[in-house]
Image: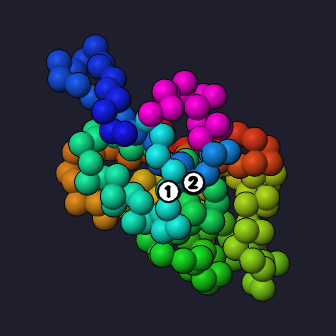
Amino acid sequence: MYSQRKTSGTHSDSYREMVLVQHDTAKKIHQELYSFDDGRYVTAGSDILESIRSLARQDVDKIHIAADWKRLLMIALWMHSQPPLFDVMCLLKKYGASEEELTPFRSSDINDFFPWLYYGSKSDILRKICNAAKAKAESQVGRKHLHITCHLVSEEPLRIVASSL
């Protein structure tokens, strides 16, 4: 499964780049943009954090993670289950949301934030959360030179809506 190789013009050795996807829709969305071979995709198990750790133990140089809002928050906060509303609100405040903007969400589900951020043109906050997920994943896997890129995928609209690139 990890035998696919990509040779870059800047590397004399083989360079292995894999994609951890949450589900087939995330794979399709990522593959339309990046055109990677099917063999480069690995579907995450029920615990996305353990899936990241497992893939990081393989002989790979770069991991793309394509996940939805909830899973991206789980990575950014490094939690094995849905993060509490309070933690998500603290993360959003850290990356630019004001207390006034968050007040209507005090008793909401964490998934209610995504439409507000996406349709409210708050792409800078989405990008910062992707970068937080990237930084957290890289710090947790224990491999110094492993590069991780996080992509926030959405089924409505069907696309990558933010990335840590």
In this view, the residue farthest toward the front is: 1
Identified at 64% across, 37% down, the residue is 28
| Residue at (63, 56) in percent of width and height | 68
Residue 20 visible? The answer is yes
Q: Position of residue 10 (x, y in %)?
A: 25, 18
Query: Residue under circle 1?
Result: 44
Q: Nearer the viewer, residue 43 or 104?
A: 43
User: Where's residue 40, x and y in %?
Assistant: 43, 35
Q: Are marks 1 and 2 in contact (CB under 8 Å)?
A: yes
Q: Of residues 37 and 145, which is closer to you in this image?
A: 37
Sort mark 1 into few (<14), some (14-19) or many (20+) by Cα contacts within 10 Å. many
Q: Is residue 139 above or below residue 4?
A: below
Instruction: Spot the residue most to the top.
Output: 9
The local crowd at label 2, few if under 14, some if 14 to 19, many if 20 or more residues have their Cα within 10 Å, is many
Name the foreground residue: 24 vs 119: 24
- The answer to whether residue 57 is left or right of residue 29 is left
Which amino acid type corresponds to the residue marked 1 in the rendered image?
Ala
Q: Is residue 161 left or right of residue 73?
A: right
Q: Give the left or right position of residue 118, taking residue 39 as reference.
A: right
The magenta segment is 27-39
Determine which of the numbered discs, if any, sits on residue 22 in the image: 2
Q: Is residue 85 above or below residue 50?
A: below
Q: Is residue 101 left or right of residue 58?
A: right
Secondary structure state at the residue bearing disc 1:
loop
From what the image shows, is residue 93 above or below residue 44? below
Residue beneath the point at 50% across and 62% down: 45
Q: CA distance from mark 1 to mark 2?
A: 5 Å
Q: Position of residue 147 (x, y in %)?
A: 32, 44
Residue 99 or 139: which is nearer the viewer? 139
User: What predominant SS class does the magenta segment belong to?
Assistant: helix
Amino acid type at circle 2 is Gln
Relative height, residue 37 to residue 27 (above, below): above
